[in-house]
Image (cartoon, rainbow, N blue to C red):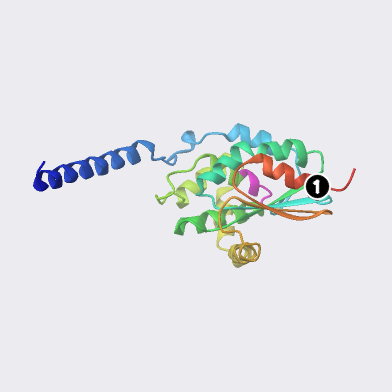
Amino acid sequence: MSQRRLVILATVVAAALVVGLVAFRALTRKEAPTSISQFQGGAEVASTFAGIPQDGTVLGDPAAPVTIDEYVDLKCPHCADAAENVVPTLVTAYVRPGRVRLRLRPLAFLAADSRSGAWAASAAARQGKMWQFADVVLRNQGDEAARWLTPTYIAHAAEVAGVDPRRLERDMARPAVRARLLADQREAELVEARTTPFWVVRGPGGVRTVSGAQIDPLLAAIGEVSPAG
């Protein structure tokens, strides 16, 4: 085969790969809900957190011997996996019995609208429903490359989570709410949380860090720092 034909063949193959990649991206692209009726998981979220004390960012008994900080970006797909597959297990097996308390630290790693999501989650904490709001958003993500954490989306997510959207909008503008994000970003740097979700597990047995959306490393960390016996 001549060099010219090889060049033509290589060009055709490259073009086909590009077209295939674009088509695959279109097929796998997640679309964020645009109306309240399109949101999913509201009942599951309500059931997961029902009856558990919630004070600001903290979910569970404030006297629990083990504290787990979860660093999240509400646009992070792996954080969505954790919301669906990790957090419910932690809540059922550890938070409800008073063995662990969870503390949510929303960050803005991925995009400009991640910041809006973090502010909204912190504002929802003022209504005692930070975890519900964050969970609803994580279960109803759009594509991480798209800008979907809009005021309308946030208002819809708030309603599904049982949060007053008008009060949420007002609270999002409060300096204390916006300062919360800066404080969490600084704390993330201190604990070297370079990806999300990132977990810091603290207890009488010390401190452990876990990265990712797998339950087994977290359970091991809880066992290592929990009180003896």
Query: Magenta stretch containing residue 130, yes or no?
Result: yes
Which percent across, then down, holds residue 218? 69, 45
Residue 110 shown left or right of residue 14 in the figure: right
Which residue lies under the disc numbered 1?
61
Q: Residue at x 62, y 41 (%)?
A: 214
Task: Say whether residue 105 is visible.
Answer: yes
Residue 185 shown left or right of residue 49 in the figure: left
Inspect the image, locate mark 1, and give the three-letter code of the amino acid beneath it: Asp
Mark 1, secondary structure of its residue: loop
* Badge count: 1
Residue 73 shown left or right of residue 104 in the figure: left
Task: Say whether residue 59 is visible.
Answer: no
Which percent across, then down, holds residue 27? 35, 36
Which percent across, then down, holds residue 42? 58, 35
Query: Magenta stretch containing residue 156, yes or no?
Result: no
Mark 1 nearby-residue class (10 Å; few <14, some 14–19, many ≥20): many
Q: Residue furthest right?
A: 229
Q: Residue at x 81, y 44 (%)?
A: 99
Q: Residue at x 76, y 36 (%)?
A: 93
Quadrant occupied by the N terminus: top left
* Closest to the observer, 144 or 133: 144
Which percent across, then down, holds residue 211? 61, 50
* Closest to the observer, 88 or 123: 88
Quadrant occupied by the C terminus: top right
The magenta segment: 127-132
* Closest to the observer, 167 or 192: 192
